[in-house]
Amino acid sequence: MCSSDLGASAADALEKITVAGWSKPITEITHLLVEPDKGIFKANGIDLAYVSGAGGGDAIRNILTGQADVAFTDPGAFFSALDKGEKLRAIYDIYPQNVFNVVSLKSANIHSPADLKGKKIGVYSLSSGTRQNLLVLLHQAGLSESDVTIVVTGLLNFAPLLQGQVDATAATDTGLLVGKRKGIGDVNVMEVRNYLNVSSDLFVVREQVYQQQKPLLKRFLKAYRESAAWMIANPEEAAGLAMKYAIDGTDRATNLEVIRLRNAATVSAATAKNGLGAFDLESLQKAADAYRKLGLIEHDIKVPDVVSTELLPAK
């Protein structure tokens, strides 16, 4: 057998997994993007592919339509899909910390959720966690989506805020960091975690995929945990590689700050005890109950019925 045949047989041995992301290939997911260099997934027998999206709702749609196997999505999009009757299962807690916020210029005098009434507010997309978490903030003040005007501004885009097209914009911690480095100036920031500290993103699969592909999904989660641990241990290397692979990775110093923020969001008391990816089921249930109470979903969700911990690697 020639060497090319050996290469082909090795490639054939890999099983493909496609991750449906909520974003384009951006710096904060560098550990997924560097697979051609690092080969962490390949070492676990996985041929990794990534499909871009514009929000967690897109990620869910891409697994429902068979475009991908695993959705990288926010709890709000997960709850919303479950509420509509979709059969889904969360299998890994990617970011146990809530990283969402609402940002406004100091001149707008927006200091609390109540101050958002009647305002124009930007979101990444209508299917994104920025919108879901904005709605959580509004409900804290007894407001609903109809009390504001929501404007789709695109990912990491503070230009509409600076140009006065919106009064405030919903973002993430990394989005705000990039905005500050680009000169948005002095701003007021309302952090959603001060109102509802729930995970920002989860890996979600269709129930059928969960039941039929457990060994493959288990290897995927092991590889993902290894890739996340690599980025936590090597932020400087990751920042350099982001310049090669991330569409927004042009500035190494910014990359490093983004990666450090995302690394911080990856760990929690639960992960310290049980390893990266571990769920805080009590927190997630509180979030599901809050979404129900706030009218964001119509049905009660029993989190233990839609979350599985059995595929998580041992610590």
Image (spheres, grey):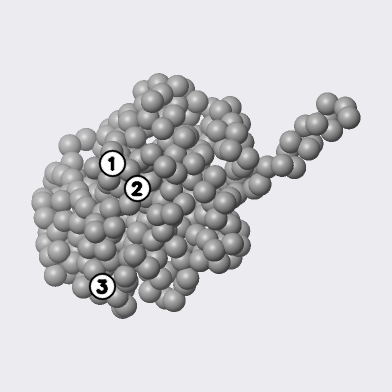
Kindly identify the amino acid type of the residue bearing the numbered disc 2. Ala
> Residue beneath label 1, please?
273
The percent coordinates of residue 161 (x first, y second) are 28, 48
Q: Quadrant of the C terminus?
A: top left
Disc 1 residue crowd, few under 14, some 14–19, many 20+, Cα 10 Å: few
Which is more foreground, mark 3 or mark 2? 2
Relative image position of residue 228 (x, y in whole percent): 43, 36
| Mark 3–mark 2 distance (CA, rounded to whole Å) | 24 Å
153, above or below 179, in the image: below
| 177 left or right, relative to 65 | left
Query: For the point 33% across and 31% down, which residue is it?
Result: 260
Question: Is residue 88 in view?
Answer: yes
* Disc 3: which residue: 292
Q: Which residue is mark 2?
A: 278
Residue 274, percent from left and from top = 32, 43
CB atoms of marks 2 and 1 within 8 Å: yes
Compared with 45, 128 (above or below) is: below
Percent across and percent down for residue 160 are 32, 49
- Near mark 3 (Cα within 10 A), the count class, few <14, some 14-19 or many ≥20, is some
Label 2 crowding class (10 Å Cα cut-off): few <14, some 14-19, many 20+?
many
